[in-house]
Structure formats: C-alpha cells, structure tokens
Image (cartoon, grey):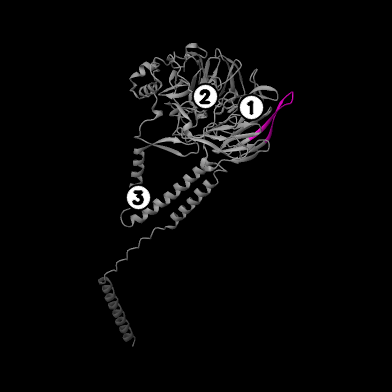
C-alpha cells in the first residue's frame, strides 16, 4: 500500500515538473512586449503668462506713482520686471520649439538681435532718470566729436570761424604735436607756481560787430548760478516773445564734452570742456561765438553713468578766471588772454591719490570755486578722516593756502556765501552733513545731518539762503527738502530744523529758486512751486511737459527752464498755476548744464553744442 502511494507521489512530481518545463519553454518562446514611449509633457504656459501679467502691473503701478515717488526707481523697477518676464517667455518659446526640433531658434535669435543692435548702436550714457541712451553708430558726428585742440582764428567772419573751428576739430591728429606744446602736465608742479600751466593758445579778438539790439551787461553772470549764486536775477532785460520766430539764434557752435556752464565777463563767455585727453578752459566771443583762447591741462574723466568731461562752472573776478577740472585741478588765468597766473592740485591738497579720489567721489570733482574778498574757496575732502578738510581758502593772487576748515567728506555741491543771523559765512553741503564755516579761519560754526554718499546716493544741490537766517537744502534719492533756521546763541550756534518734506522739492542736479516765501524747483523732474513758510506745494506742471533732470532759473517774474532733453522753456513765475510762455527746441541731446542769462541773451550748452539766443530787448 505504501509502495502504491509512493509511486503515485513520484508520478505527480514528474507531471508537475513536465508542466513547469513546458511553461518555461513557452515563456521563453513568447517575445517581450515593447514599452510604450513616454509622452513628452507639454511646457506649462502659466508661469510665463503670470510673469507677463505681473510685469505689466509692476510697470503700470511704478510709472503711475513715479511723479509722487521717484522716476529713477520706477524705471529700474520697470526694467527688472520686463527682464524677468522676458526670461520666462524665452524659456517657454524654447521648450515649445524644442518639441518640434527647432529649439535652437530662440538662443540664435537672442544672440543675433543683441549683436545686430550692438553693431548699429552704441551706448551713450543714461538720463538723470536712468533711461539708457543709444546712438546710431554711423550717424554724422556731432559736437562731441570736437575733441582736438583748435587753433583760434581772427581773420574770418563769424560763420567762417564756425566752419573753420569744426574743420579743425575734424582734422587728423597730425596737429596734436603743436597742441602739445601749448599744454603742460601740472601733476608734478608745485602749487602757486606761475608756470604750472603752459602759455595759452590765444587769438586777437576781431572787431566787434553791430549788436543789433543786444543788451548785455557783461558783469551780470560771473559765477555759478549767477551774480548772487542762487539762480535768481532781480530784473529781466528781455521781452517775452510771442512766438519762436521772434527769437534770434545769434550763434551755434560745436563744443567739447562736459556739464559746465558759461560765466560771462568782458564780452567773453567762458566755460570748461573736454578736448581729447585735455580738460580745457575756453573763452568764446559773447557776440559771435568765436573761440578767443583756450587753456588746457592734462586730464580725462569719464563715468558710465555720469558721462565725460568737467562738471564745475568757472568764476570770474577782477580780470581773473578761476576754474576746477573734473580731475581736481584748480586753474587761475587772465580773462583777457587766458595766460596762466597760478594753479593748485586739489587732489594733493586733500592728501588723496587719484585712485582714492575716483573711488570715493565717483562722478568727478564738481564744486565750483567761490570768490569772497581776497579768497578763493574750494571744497577739498580727503581719504583720511583724521586729516580731512572740508574746505580750503586760497589767496586769489598766489593760490597759497590761507586756512582749511571742517572734517566732512566733500559732495558734488558748491560752497555758498551767506549772511545768516548777521554773520557772513561759508555754507557747504557735504557728503553726509551741511555745515557753516567762519570766513576768518574756516572753523565750523554749526552743522546738521544730511545723509548721502558721494559714490552712491550723492548730494548734488547747493544750499540756498531763505530770508536772513534760514537755509534750504534739497536732494533726490528720497531726500526731498529741508528748511533749517540758523541761530546765533552767543557762545554757540544752533541749526534748528523747521521742516523736512521727503516728497517736496526733490532736486537732483538743480536748485530751488527762491522769491520771498515761494520756491520754484524741479522736483523729481517736475517743476513745482512751494510755499516755504507752510511747506505746502502750490502747483506742479503737467507730467507731459516736465523737464526731467534739467535746470531752472528765476529772472524777475519769469522762469527759465532747461529741459534735460534740450528744450528751452519760459514760464510764468506765479503762485497760482503753471503757465508756459514759450518753448524753443534748442539742444537735441541730454543737457545737464545750467543756462546763463546775460541781458537779453540766453546761453545754453550741453556736452555737444552751445547756442546763444537773443530775445527782444525790454523797453
């Protein structure tokens, strides 16, 4: 019985083994099914759409609120939003095209577009509101091509002189050997040395042509911001033209790069400009625009944002011209012929190296010299706080240092002479403070905090006196304006803040013009009138006409406005509302220079051209 059971068990195992073998053979014989290809996921469009929607909202909101905030920051925010949205869109297009084998089109298109744009256009700086400027590379050269040292000529008519000067500017540099003999490197010269500058390149002035109704008081604009150094002329010697055709373009010339303005005396309009690798002090005939003389000093300043050339405006006093270059050289020459009297190196005076100065004061030396009595007041600064001097007073006849004062770092603002609480004093807007200094020895009388940084959110606007004991200071970058009362307490001075309004009179390169208790200024590029007693905005000009980072002057009852984009505008200086009287399409490129008003002449310039307009004389 047990044998039968054992045999059945063996037969069962054998059957199972055979079945298993058949199964294995069948399994091996059956081909494996191919895996289905994985479907490519469609690129998600939502992120790119969301980025575009957000960018649109950011641009709309920032530009809508820019007039109350800051156009510069609004533009930067807009650029960032558009760039980010552009990246999202480019990635989406790349993924969509890659699905059909054309993904390479996106990077090739981007690279080709950038290369083509760079081939056709060149970067030419930015506006004061950080809008990049590009110029067609192959356009006819304009005023900024005027880089060589011209030879003045007195034997031709005005029109011929202009043509000859332009031809000289465009000729080959074969004449530079001659020019070099008329310039000298002052880097290694001792201060006050009469030979620190080479003899000037001078021409004998031609016979003065008929002025044809010209009313020009040569002594009315001899320094930065005019006779009172506040951008205000008490009387207007020109009529308000009813139309542009009543304005005569007396002369128009090409000029070297720079943001200096004209100072006028003895029938000469004197300014600073960049010529080749030289910073040039130049004198033009006020009536004809003919170059009278040129004095140069080696130096070249350029900044990607700030541009090229000198920034300050010369000062004219008793037959001498005092001028500071962007590289910190102070020149004193004769008004009549440009011959040198003395020079000073303000970089060495401040114990800077040029590299230290360029790092700390990124956009070049900008303060214009101030002449007071027998002193030439200049800003100095320095790299070492323990040895730093805010300002220095030099002898106007020799250039010798009489005194130094203060310990604050310099800004781009010019020193001002004010009489506050009955005492004449020098007021300086510094890198982080505003301070008043004794005329006797430069000692600091008072100061108050005014935050800034000379290589970032810089202080550019000078202080302006209000009444007998108040100082108005403004800035951009969210600073606004403040009005401070200066009090003489006998044993000490006090600076008492009356108000500070970050949203009011946000002056950048321009200054507030004060008439009584009303201030007129370009706030964030928009002309506004402010009641200084009440710290209240009376009116603002429309956004569509705003002058941007331009300039404004007050001539009796008329505002002379230089728009950043070149237009010259006359407007009524009213407490009621903005009223434009005349608009002239003057200069055709970025203009940061302050206009000059002399009688019935208005001189404007930028880094390429200079124009003298003659308005009808006032009866």
Q: Residues within 10 Å of mark 1 (few under 14, many from 20)?
A: many
Mark 2 lies on a secondary structure that is loop
Residue 330 showing in the rendered view: yes
Across and down, in percent, residue 434 comes to 62, 29
Which residue range is magenta in the image? 482-498
Q: Give the foreground label among 1 and 3.
A: 1
- Do tag 1 and tag 2 residues touch (Cβ < 8 Å)? no
| Viewer-side residue, 124 vs 202 | 202
Which of marks 3 and 2 precedes in the sequence?
3
Q: Is residue 298 left or right of residue 2?
A: right
Asked whether residue 483 is drawn in magenta, I would say: yes
Helix, strand, or loop for circle 1? strand
Counting residues from the start of the chain, the first of labels 1 and 3 encountered is 3
Q: Which residue is mark 1?
A: 435
- Residue 313 — which label? 2
Q: Residue 106 shows which numbered tag?
A: 3
Q: Main secondary structure of the magenta part?
A: strand
The residue at the point 41 percent across, 23 percent down is 277
């Amino acid at each position: 019985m047990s044998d039968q059971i054992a045999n059945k068990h063996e037969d069962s195992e054998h059957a199972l083994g055979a079945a298993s073998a058949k199964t294995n053979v069948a399994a091996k014989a059956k081909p494996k099914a191919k895996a289905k290809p994985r479907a490519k996921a469609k690129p998600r469009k939502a992120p790119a759409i969301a980025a575009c929607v957000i960018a649109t909202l950011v641009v709309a909101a920032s530009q809508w609120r820019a007039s109350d905030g800051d156009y510069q920051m609004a533009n930067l925010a807009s650029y960032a939003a558009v760039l980010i949205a552009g990246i999202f869109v480019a990635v989406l297009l790349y993924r969509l095209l890659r699905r059909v084998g054309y993904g390479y089109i996106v990077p090739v298109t981007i690279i080709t577009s950038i290369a083509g744009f760079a081939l056709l256009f060149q970067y030419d700086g930015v506006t004061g509101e950080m809008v990049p400027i590009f110029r067609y590379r192959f356009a006819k050269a304009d005023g900024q091509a005027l880089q060589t040292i011209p030879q003045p000529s007195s034997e031709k008519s005005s029109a011929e002189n202009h043509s000859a000067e332009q031809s000289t500017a465009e000729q080959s540099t074969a004449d530079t050997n001659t020019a070099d003999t008329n310039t000298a490197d002052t880097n290694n010269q001792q201060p006050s040395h009469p030979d620190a500058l080479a003899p000037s390149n001078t021409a004998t002035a031609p016979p003065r042509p008929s002025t044809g109704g010209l009313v020009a008081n040569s002594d009315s604009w001899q320094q930065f911001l005019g006779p009172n150094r506040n951008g205000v002329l008490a009387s207007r010697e020109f009529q308000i033209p009813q139309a542009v055709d009543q304005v005569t373009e007396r002369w128009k010339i090409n000029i070297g790069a720079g943001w200096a303005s004209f100072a006028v005396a003895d029938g000469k309009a004197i300014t600073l400009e960049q010529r080749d690798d030289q910073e040039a002090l130049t004198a033009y005939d006020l009536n004809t625009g003919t170059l009278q003389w040129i004095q140069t000093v080696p130096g070249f300043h350029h900044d990607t944002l700030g541009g090229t050339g000198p920034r300050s405006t010369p000062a004219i006093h008793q037959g001498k011209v005092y001028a500071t270059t962007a590289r910190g050289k102070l020149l004193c020459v004769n008004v009549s012929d440009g011959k040198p009297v003395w020079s000073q190196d303000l970089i060495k005076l401040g114990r800077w190296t040029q590299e230290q100065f360029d790092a700390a004061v990124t956009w070049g030396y900008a303060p214009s010299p101030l002449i007071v009595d027998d002193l030439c007041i200049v800003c100095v600064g320095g790299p070492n706080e323990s040895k730093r001097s805010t300002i220095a007073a030099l002898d106007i006849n020799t250039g010798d240092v009489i005194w130094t004062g203060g310990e604050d770092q310099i800004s781009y603002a010019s020193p001002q002479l004010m009489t506050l609480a009955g005492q004449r004093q020098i007021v300086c807007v510094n890198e982080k403070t505003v301070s008043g200094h004794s005329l006797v020895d430069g000692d600091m009388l008072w100061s108050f905090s005014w935050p800034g940084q000379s290589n970032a959110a810089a202080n550019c606007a000078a202080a302006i006196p209000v009444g007998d004991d108040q100082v108005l200071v403004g800035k951009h970058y969210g600073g606004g304006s403040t009005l401070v009362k200066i009090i003489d307490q006998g044993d000490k001075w006090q600076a008492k803040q009356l108000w500070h309004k970050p949203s009011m009179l946000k002056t950048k390169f321009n200054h507030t013009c004060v008439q009584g208790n009303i201030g007129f200024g370009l706030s964030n590029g928009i002309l506004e009138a402010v009641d200084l007693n009440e710290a209240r905005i009376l009116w603002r000009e429309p956004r569509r006409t705003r002058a941007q980072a331009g300039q404004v002057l007050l001539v009796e009852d008329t505002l002379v406005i230089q728009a950043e984009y070149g237009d010259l505008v006359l407007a009524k200086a009213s407490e009621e509302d903005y009223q434009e009287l005349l608009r002239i399409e003057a200069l055709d490129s970025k203009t940061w220079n302050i206009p000059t008003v002399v009688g019935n002449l208005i001189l404007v310039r930028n880094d390429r051209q200079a124009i003298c307009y003659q308005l009808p004389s006032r009866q």
